[in-house]
Amino acid sequence: MLAALGLGSVIGILLGLLGGGGSILAVPALVYGAGLSLAAAVPASLLVVGISSATAALPRIRAGQVRWRIAAVFGGAGAVAAFGGAALNRLLPARVVLLGFAALMVVAGWRMLAEQVSRGGACALPGGGVHWRGCLPKSVAAGAVVGVLTGLFGVGGGFLVVPALVLVLGLPMQAAVGTSLVVVTANAAAGLAAHTDGAGAGQGIIVAFTVAAVAGSLAAARLARRLDAGRLRRWFAALVFAVAVFVAVQAISGPGG
């Protein structure tokens, strides 16, 4: 229980400082730090992702930074696809899932090191709207990919949603972040519903981890403005790479399935 509280606090602090991304470490922390099985760690991670994303989305909703039509397309496709990802999670051996998760962490770390994307994309209209006739299939496909990853690995996928919204649909960064938080919340809720079979295991640890993560994120959010965001992201990307290597080594050297 103490390990769950400590690790949850660390994940929450990272979420609060970075505004997202910290939840990529939730599954490894729960599996290797708190001793949960992968089947229990994925829904626990989704719970943290959903609550933290919903909390972060509230002020952006009040500020009018959410494009609801786009959120409905991405979130709707992602929510349906999350059930497919959860089904795939149950079919694959735990070793394969963890190796895939390690690869996804490398992608997430690379995205954190990349420079901010600029607004663009063939889907953007001059008045700030979206050319839906030509870009609806792209939007549904992108939302479905993120949904599958959510159900399969227990991640929010915000590090993929934001670039897609900016580069493909041409949203300004503030609107992309706000819309992404709504999409991630919907995907996490769908993924959690799809993982009801594993959600009952280790409930005390899951509750302690989630409460500590939310408390840590709220406390750290006050410090975020005083720190160098670029340096924080570089340090965190290095941590993600290191954990990815650890997860991969453990998956390869540990017992199969």
Image (cartoon, rainbow, N blue to C red):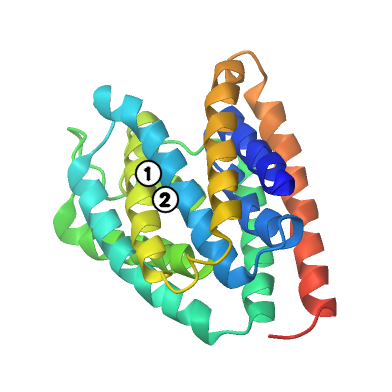
Q: Which residue sits at x=66%, y=42%?
A: 5
Disc 1 crowd, CA 10 A, few/some/many (<14, 14-19, 20+): many
* Res. 73 visible in picture: yes
Where residue 222 sits, quadrant-wise, is top right
Seen as rendered, the residue at the extreme top is 226
Residue 178 image offset from top left, x and y in percent: 35, 35
Type of amino acid under label 2:
Val
**Mark linked to residue 129:** none
The answer to whether residue 226 is above or below residue 202 is: above
Foreground residue among 178 and 8: 8
Secondary element at tag 2? helix
The answer to whether residue 26 is above or below residue 251 is: above
The residue at which mark 1 appears reads as 180
In which quadrant of the rendered image does the C terminus lie? bottom right
* Res. 113 visible in picture: no
CB atoms of marks 1 and 2 within 8 Å = yes
Type of amino acid under label 1:
Ser
Q: Earlier in the sequence, mark 1 or mark 2?
A: 2
Where residue 153 sits, quadrant-wise, is bottom right
The residue at which mark 2 appears reads as 161
Q: Which residue sits at x=77%, y=69%?
A: 248
Q: Which residue sits at x=72%, y=50%?
A: 240
Secondary element at tag 1? helix
